Image (cartoon, rainbow, N blue to C red):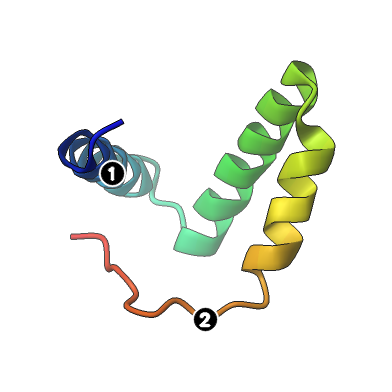
Amino acid sequence: MTDDKLIEMISEIDATFGNMVGKYQLPPLSFTSIVLARILLINESCGTGQDFRQLLSEVAVKTPKSPEVMR
């Protein structure tokens, strides 16, 4: 995947997430919990659940160098 395609995908995800938070009037933490549970379920069904949980444990302790904000 090229950088341009990655940026395009991230922008689309951010817009979709923002729209859903507004549409369903969900607090961001509630929405994030739902999305995270669905992502975990996808990884479990594809056989990558353990790798995904490992990734989460590593990401959880790292501070982003330049946090992005959804617009």
- Helix or strand or loop: what does disc 1 sit on? helix
Locate residue 67: give its quadrant. Answer: bottom left
Residue 34: % across, % down: 60, 43
Mark 2 is surrounded, within 10 Å at the Cα level, by few (under 14), some (14 to 19) or many (20 or more) other residues, namely few
Cα gap from disc 2 to disc 1, whole angstroms: 19 Å
Residue 60: % across, % down: 66, 70
Q: Residue at x 75, y 63 (%)?
A: 57
User: Quick one: label 2 or label 1, which is nearer the N terminus?
Assistant: 1
**Residue tagged by mark 2?**
63
Locate residue 19: give its quadrant. Answer: top left
Residue 20: % across, % down: 35, 40
Mark 1 is surrounded, within 10 Å at the Cα level, by few (under 14), some (14 to 19) or many (20 or more) other residues, namely few
Q: Residue at x 51, y 50 (%)?
A: 31
**Residue tagged by mark 1?**
10
12 vs 63: above or below:
above
Label number found at residue 71: none
Q: Is residue 42 left or right of residue 16?
A: right
Q: Amino acid at mark 1?
A: Ile
Q: Residue at x 15, y 39 (%)?
A: 4
Q: Residue at x 76, y 30 (%)?
A: 48
Q: Quadrant of the C terminus?
A: bottom left
- Helix or strand or loop: what does disc 2 sit on? loop
Q: Is residue 54 left or right of residue 25?
A: right
Disc 2 and disc 1 in contact, CB within 8 angstroms: no
Q: Amino acid at mark 2?
A: Thr
Residue 41: % across, % down: 73, 29
Q: Quadrant of the N terminus?
A: top left
63 vs 7: above or below:
below
